[in-house]
Image (cartoon, rainbow, N blue to C red):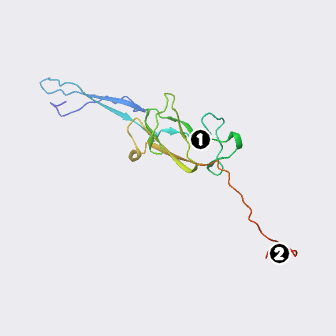
């Protein structure tokens, strides 16, 4: 109230997660009423959730099991992988703002499922980062980052035996 310098507020609503609206109007001593002003804000108390699993090629099931935190894809003859796919889910009560895999944006489906395939052989540590719709990112602690390590090596090593001589007494000259 601009005329008395007092304010009144209805604070009966508990601030649960989600989008909130604040409406304000002023009334002076003469009874003049200002236009209503509104402000929209987000209450966000939880970080987003993200999962990631590694699959051989694109459609294999089940997901590959990590050994000591590393997923290995090796040569398996005719059934060797030609690529591997990271698949998972993301969720947050306020919605997902951004999902990045190795710094590249990935758009999850409406049910939160996402996937990204890779074909480069080698030792890879993939970083999956998700930020929620409230706009909170690392500074506010409302993003989540996980890593997945994959060693993708389907090249069979070549073994060779060099010619050597053995003497009759079993020693090498």
Q: Seen in the image, is 74 located left or right of residue 15? A: right
Q: Nearer the viewer, residue 45 or 3?
A: 45
Q: Nearer the viewer, residue 92 or 172?
A: 172
Q: Give the label, 2 or 1, closer to the camera.
A: 2
Q: Quadrant of the N terminus?
A: top left
Q: Which residue corresponds to the image point at 16% horizontal and 31% vertical from the top-left?
A: 2
Element marked by disc 1: strand
Q: Estimate the x, y position of residue 69 in percent, counting from the top left.
A: 61, 50
Q: Estimate the x, y position of residue 141 in percent, counting from the top left.
A: 42, 45
**Residue ID for mark 2:** 171
Q: Residue furthest left?
A: 30
Circle 2 residues within 10 Å: few <14, some 14–19, many ≥20? few
Q: Quadrant of the C terminus?
A: bottom right
Residue 84's disc is 1
Nearest to N terminus: mark 2 or mark 1: 1
Q: Residue furthest right?
A: 168
Residue 99's disc is none
Q: Is residue 133 above or below residue 27?
A: below
Q: Is residue 73 above or below residue 30?
A: below
Element marked by disc 2: loop
Q: Seen in the image, is 170 located left or right of residue 132? A: right
Q: Nearer the viewer, residue 161 or 56?
A: 161
Q: Estimate the x, y position of residue 8 in percent, counting from the top left.
A: 26, 30
Q: Estimate the x, y position of residue 87 in percent, counting from the top left.
A: 56, 37
Q: Which residue corresponds to the image point at 51% horizontal and 35% vertical from the top-left?
A: 90
Q: Seen in the image, is 23 located left or right of residue 3? A: right
- Alpha carbons under labels 2 and 1: distance apart: 49 Å
Circle 1 residues within 10 Å: few <14, some 14–19, many ≥20? many
């Amino acid at each position: 109230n601009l005329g008395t310098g007092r304010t009144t507020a209805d604070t009966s609503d508990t601030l649960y997660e989600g989008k909130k609206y604040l409406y304000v109007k002023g009334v002076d001593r003469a009874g003049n009423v200002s236009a209503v002003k509104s402000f929209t804000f987000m209450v966000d108390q939880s970080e987003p959730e993200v999962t990631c699993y590694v699959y051989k090629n694109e459609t294999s099931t089940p997901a590959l099991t990590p050994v000591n935190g590393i997923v290995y894809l090796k040569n398996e003859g005719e059934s060797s992988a030609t690529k591997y796919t990271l698949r998972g889910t993301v969720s947050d009560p306020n919605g997902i703002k951004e999902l990045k895999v190795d710094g590249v944006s990935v758009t999850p489906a409406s049910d939160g499922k996402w996937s990204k395939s890779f074909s480069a052989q080698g030792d890879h540590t993939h970083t999956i980062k998700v930020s929620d719709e409230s706009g909170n990112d690392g500074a506010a602690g409302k993003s989540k980052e996980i890593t997945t390590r994959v060693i993708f090596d389907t090249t069979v090593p070549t073994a060779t035996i060099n010619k050597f001589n053995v003497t009759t007494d079993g020693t090498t000259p």
